[in-house]
């Protein structure tokens, strides 16, 4: 029973590492160039600090998840791991929120501040970013499952 | 609720647990204040400017420009997220005498975790939009707006800082709740 739950958590963490890694990679490889009226308009993720934060946050999440796989499950570090799990989930959620806010402005513009939408000119970049956001969202959902599982296995038996 | 079967002399286990309980209540109150401040300051964030856009002969044509928080979906989400978090903290504080069982503590722990994520995501989205409003984006031809609406940006900044403080406090509370649950220690009222 304990072995099954440990294998379950191992599998979930591997999936989370894969999801966050793919989110970081997909965002990092997104760039597109178009020529509009003779002007070259290129879009790279480095031009927006939110997207840079997104890549870094997902890279940190992936690295942390792979590191945690090396921690033995019943040691003094496991309390620390539970707390760090919450912090990393918060970081990933914040990354999605920040990138999502900028993407929404890019897609729909903001008429009140005079910001025109740019997804019409660089559709492939926008699709790429959307793919990265979906991967990161999957990563956050899997992290939520990991946290729920931790609560169930570690704290559940302590219930009276 | 104190651990019955440990007898200690000195400063007294009960007193230590009581002080810890009081500290937790103070932290929760501080988180409530921080998120409530963020909500209120952002919800009341509005700036109107009248500018002369053209001249017809000698009479100036004045147009009114407004900056409201509703113009940006990220700020709307920010207000909603901080409102939900402050309501949650308020509920936890008010229902404290009634929630003493272990299962209630687990619900509280789960709720705290959700609130940490919610507030963090709201603050991150609003920070992204605030950075865009302050610096603009040269490559997308988006001009900054903070040079024209400085009071709006200032108040937005204050709300953001309050929300970040609230998120940090909620995270500390969640960490304490984790340690409490894992070590099976009960905090006395």
Image (cartoon, coloured by chain):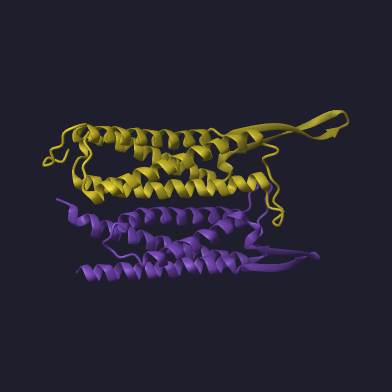
Quarter in which the N terminus of chain A is drawn: bottom left
Residue projecting furthest to the top: B59
Would you place residue B144 above or below residue A7 in this image? Answer: above
The image shows residue B52 at horizontal and vertical percentages of: 78, 33
For image coordinates 62% across by 62% down, the residue present is: A45
Residue A4 as seen in the image, left or right of residue B58? left
The image shows residue B61 at horizontal and vertical percentages of: 79, 32
The image shows residue B82 at horizontal and vertical percentages of: 44, 41
The image shows residue B28 at horizontal and vertical percentages of: 35, 36
Query: In front: B120, or B23?
Result: B23
Query: In this figure, what is the number of numbered marks?
Result: 0
Which chain's colour is yellow?
B
For image coordinates 85% across by 33% down, the residue present is: B56
| Displayed quadrant of residue B168 | top left
Q: Chain A takes which shade in the image?
A: purple
Would you place residue A68 above or below residue B131 in this image? Answer: below
| Displayed quadrant of residue A14 | bottom left
Residue B71 as seen in the image, left or right of residue B100? right
Residue projecting furthest to the left: B5
Judge whether residue B34 can be spotted in this image.
yes
């Amino acid at each position: 029973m304990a072995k099954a739950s440990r294998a379950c958590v191992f599998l979930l963490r591997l999936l989370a590492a894969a999801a966050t890694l793919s989110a970081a990679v997909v965002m990092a490889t997104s760039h597109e160039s178009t020529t509009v009226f003779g002007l070259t308009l290129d879009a790279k993720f480095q031009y927006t600090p939110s997207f840079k934060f997104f890549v870094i946050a997902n890279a940190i999440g992936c690295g942390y998840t792979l590191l945690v796989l090396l921690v033995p499950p019943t040691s003094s570090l496991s309390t620390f791991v539970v707390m760090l799990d919450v912090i990393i989930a918060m970081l990933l959620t914040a990354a999605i929120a920040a990138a999502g806010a900028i993407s929404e402005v890019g897609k729909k513009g903001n008429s009140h501040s005079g910001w025109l939408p740019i997804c019409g000119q660089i559709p492939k970049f926008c699709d790429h970013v959307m793919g990265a956001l979906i991967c990161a969202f999957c990563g956050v959902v899997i992290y939520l499952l990991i946290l729920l599982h931790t609560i169930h296995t570690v704290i559940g038996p302590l219930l009276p | 609720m104190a651990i019955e079967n440990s007898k200690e002399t000195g400063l007294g286990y009960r007193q230590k647990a009581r002080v810890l309980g009081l500290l937790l209540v103070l932290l929760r109150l501080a988180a409530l204040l921080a998120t409530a401040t963020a909500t209120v300051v952002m919800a009341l964030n509005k700036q109107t400017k009248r500018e002369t856009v053209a001249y017809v002969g000698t009479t100036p044509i004045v147009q009114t420009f407004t900056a409201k928080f509703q113009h940006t979906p990220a700020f709307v989400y920010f207000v909603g997220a901080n409102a939900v978090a402050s309501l949650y903290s308020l509920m936890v504080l008010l229902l404290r005498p009634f929630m003493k069982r272990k299962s209630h503590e687990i619900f509280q722990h789960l709720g705290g975790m959700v609130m940490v994520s919610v507030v963090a995501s709201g603050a991150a989205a609003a920070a992204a939009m605030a950075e865009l409003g302050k610096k603009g984006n040269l490559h997308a031809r988006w001009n900054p707006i903070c040079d024209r609406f400085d009071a709006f940006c200032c108040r937005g900044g204050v709300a953001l800082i309050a929300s970040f403080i609230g998120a940090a406090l909620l995270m500390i509370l969640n960490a304490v709740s984790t340690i409490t649950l894992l070590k099976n220690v009960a905090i006395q009222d």
